[in-house]
Image (cartoon, rainbow, N blue to C red):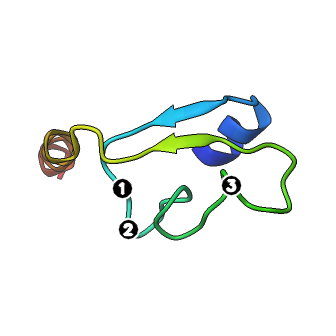
Amino acid sequence: MCAGAITLARIRRLIYGAEDPKAGAVHSMLHVLNHPKLNHQVEVTAGVLAAKCMDLLQTFFRNRR
C-alpha cells in the first residue's frame, strides 16, 4: 500500500532503513516503485541506519504481542 501511494503521489525519492522480507514492495517481495510498466520511477536509498531501524521495529512488535 505504501509503495502504491508513493507512486500515485509522484514522490521522487524514498529513503528507508529496514526491509520487510515477507511483504515489502520496494526491494523485498516486489519492485513496485521502479516497475518498467509504470510511468513514474522513484529514486530509492535503502538501508539507512538499518540496524537501528530493525531494532526499533522488533521492539515495537515485541511490545505489541
Work out whether residue 1 can be spotted. no
Q: Amino acid at mark 2?
A: Pro
Q: CA distance from mark 2 to mark 1?
A: 6 Å
User: On the picture, is 39 further left or further right than 62?
Assistant: right
User: x%, y% of residue 11?
Assistant: 67, 29
Between residue 60 and residue 12, name the one nearer to us: 12
Q: Amino acid at mark 1?
A: Glu
Q: Nearer the viewer, mark 1 or mark 3?
A: 3
Q: Which residue is mark 2?
A: 21
Q: Which residue is mark 3?
A: 34
User: x%, y% of residue 34?
Assistant: 68, 54
Which residue corresponds to the image point at 49% horizontal and 61% vertical from the top-left?
A: 27
Badge 1 marks a residue whose secondary structure is loop
Q: Which residue is mark 1?
A: 19
User: On the picture, is 52 further left or further right than 41?
Assistant: left
> Which numbered disc flags the more N-terminal residue, 1 or 3?
1
Q: Dots 1 and 3: beta carbons under 8 Å?
A: no
Q: CA distance from mark 1 to mark 3?
A: 16 Å
Between residue 28 and residue 40, name the one nearer to us: 40
